[in-house]
Image (tube, helix red, strand yellow):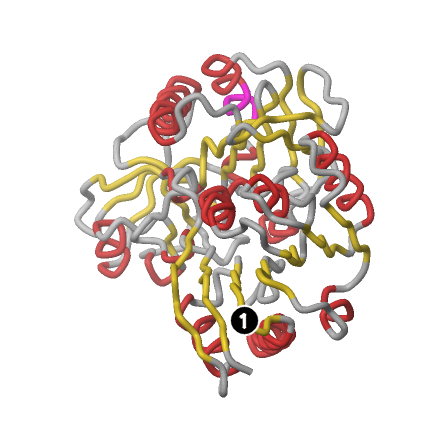
Amino acid sequence: MKVPSVRLSPRGVRRVLAGRLWLEERDLAERPSEPPGTEVRLLSPEGYFLARGYTNPRSRIPVRIFSREDQSLDVPFLAELFKRALNLRRKIYPGEEAFRLIHGEGDGIPGLTVDVYGGVIVVQISTAGLERRREEILAALSGVLSPSALVLRNDLPVRREEGLDLYVEVVSGRVDPPIEITMDGLRFLVDPLEGQKTGFFLDQRENRRFVRRLSREALVLDLFAYTGAFGIYALAGGARRVFAVERSERALALAEETARLNGFGDRFFPIPGRVEEFLREAPDTDLVILDPPAFVKTHRALSAGLEKYREVNRLALRALGRGLLFTSSCSQFVSGEKLLEIVRGLSRGRSLRLLSRHFQAPDHPENPAHPETLYLKGFTFWVSGV
């Protein structure tokens, strides 16, 4: 079948050569008229082949690139992509059963996320081009990984921008949530059907390991705890007690059960409710873990979202007389320097020592041509003085 071609503007050529995988309307000599999800060959103004991509004229990103070679987005291509990604993850996390296999642009394929939880594979597709290749993606994953179950978590709101429906589907096998995984010798419960994202936040793995090293004999506040992973790592590191604050009672119930599974039930205290309200009368503590949701999900929400980050960090600092603060942001619209500026601005009269800067785990690779792929930023401070 003949693949239609799209000629790029000089700007578009420069962006492709720089490694960018998204092309805007001004990067194209003419806007493609093909139906959403159509594969296209991308050409220079002179007609030289540059890359293969797929289109969506309805989207603010009308073309996304998936290959620098002139090859189709078919099962063999996808299977090779998944094999390379799997080999890399096995180097990064040998023997681990839970990891991110595909991180969208970070792995060179915009619009696709694949998380592995033992034998259960959870897939998120966010673009029309990949939705049209849904069956090829699932077939390639099945061939490479032989999963016991495949789940599509296609309930991402961003799909609406691509003209796609939102749905969750168990494509093959059977899933009875919660499922259990092991990570760093600890047991965790994951709900891949109704949990946040794909059911678990794999991106904080390295940061949880760091927190574990700081937790001996500490009284810990795990704020925005979700299913309690930070708190479990703190208890594994010898924390005296963990108070886990979370609005979702469903998530908090999983956190409490996870603590029992790991033998920490007598030191883990779940607290349902809003973090801000809890912190207004929080006890003095030794270690505060602040892992909020993305308060800034669009550029338009930046001002209000930054104020939310200021509020929760101000209250967290107030709960610390002398101790450790781990704080983070998972919003791609908030830079690490902006978060650092917020904490510094709130610490007047206090002594701050920056112990470590934190990022997402390496199974969530950053694509340097796509700053958006470096979305998780964090810091650990030693705080003293009042």
Residue at image location 41% in from the left, 19% down from the top:
79
Residue at image location 28% in from the left, 56% down from the top:
12
Q: Which residues are magenta?
A: 134-138
- Circle 1 sits in a helix, a strand or a loop, which is it? strand
Q: Can you say which quadrant of the picture contains the C terminus? A: bottom right
377 relative to 51 in the view: left or right: right
Check the image and report above or below for 218 versus 199.
Answer: below
Q: Which residue appears farthest toward the front when viewing the image?
A: 217
Residue annotated with mark 1: 322
**Which one is in front, 217 or 373?**
217
Residue 147 is situated, as x and y percent measured from the top left of the image, at 57, 15
Q: Is 191 within the magenta? A: no
Check the image and report above or below for 306 versus 44.
Answer: below
267 relative to 357 in the view: left or right: right
Query: Would you say the magenta stretch is mainly helix, strand or loop?
Result: helix
- Report which quarter residue 278 is drawn in: bottom right
Q: Is 136 within the magenta? A: yes
Q: Is residue 163 visible?
A: no
Residue 265 is situated, as x and y percent measured from the top left of the image, at 75, 38
Check the image and report above or below for 103 versus 86.
Answer: below
Q: Can you say which quadrant of the picture contains the N terminus? A: top left
- Report which quarter residue 175 is drawn in: top right
Residue 325 is situated, as x and y percent measured from the top left of the image, at 53, 64
